[in-house]
Image (cartoon, coloured by chain):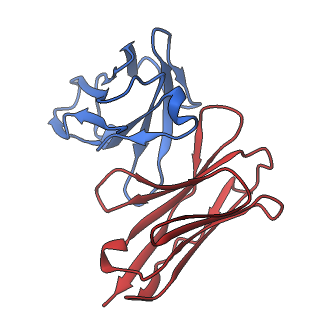
Amino acid sequence: GAVVSQHPSWVICKSGTSVKIECRSLDFQATTMFWYRQFPKQSLMLMATSNEGSKATYEQGVEKDKFLINHASLTLSTLTVTSAHPEDSSFYICSARTYRTSDTQYFGPGTRLTVL
Amino acid sequence: QKEVEQNSGPLSVPEGAIASLNCTYSDRGSQSFFWYRQYSGKSPELKMFIYSNGDKEDGRFTAQLNKASQYVSLLIRDSQPSDSATYLCAFTGGGNKLTFGTGTQLKVEL
């Protein structure tokens, strides 16, 4: 149980384009989903927290107009990187939790974004 | 002071030995503690979670929590080459957010 999927697993795009990443909880309803970014040889950095049906809460320094998060249902959250630039190239990972799992977060497999 | 401190390693142990990974945290309000394993290029995988002082065992893995001393550790018995990975310590306080350490790289050598 507690399986989280992400799509796509990797994407290469040109500078200036937008990229959408999907995160799905497959066998449970996620009350909260989280989006992280991880640069090489660094730890995970939380970008934002989203609850179903409400606006995402962004961490300090994360541009909400650049990283659009939509949590439309209890099983789906999307992250759209708008007007991507090479410095946005990173490993984006989502996680999900539910009231049944208390504080425990289950992570998706991640999406590797490369912006040329 | 960093919120979570981990030795970055690498920690090298021979196959079959006990690997001991340690983590200290600064927030006394921390409530839940987690160990995630992350292979290179992959996302973190939950290995252990612990809420109460003492030990929690799951197979070859044992998590130890000492809230008075503000440390949490992970012991891996009979270490295998497949255990080679980066181990991330994390905790939550009163809210939703996980705070991660920078991770300890473990290498189990044949």
The one of B56 and B68 positioned closer to us in this rendering: B56
Q: Is residue B99 above or below residue B54?
A: above
Q: Quadrant of residue B78?
A: bottom left
Horizontal side, residue A37 vs residue A10: left or right: right
Which residue is found at the position 37% from the left and 82% from the top? B108
Chain A shade in the render: blue
Tell me where residue B107 appears, x and y as whole percent. 39, 80
Q: Is residue B103 above or below residue B93?
A: below
Q: Is residue A73 above or below residue A94?
A: above
Which residue is found at the position 57% from the left and 57% from the top? B101
Which residue is found at the position 31% from the left and 22% from the top? A80
Which quadrant is home to the C terminus of chain A? Answer: top left
Tell me where residue B26 appears, x and y as whole percent. 76, 54
Horizontal side, residue B26 vs residue A28: left or right: right
The one of B48 and B24 positioned closer to us in this rendering: B48
Q: How many marks?
A: 0
The one of A116 and B1 positioned closer to us in this rendering: B1
Which residue is found at the position 70% from the left and 40% from the top? B93
Tell me where residue B105 appears, x and y as whole percent. 45, 71
Tell me where residue A77 appears, x and y as whole percent. 35, 21
Horizontal side, residue B33 vs residue A35: left or right: right
The one of A103 and A48 positioned closer to us in this rendering: A103
Chain B shade in the render: red
Horizontal side, residue A80 vs residue B99: left or right: left
Which quadrant is home to the N terminus of chain A? Answer: top left
Q: Is residue A36 above or below residue B107?
A: above
Whether residue A86 appears in this view of the structure is yes
Whether residue A116 appears in this view of the structure is no
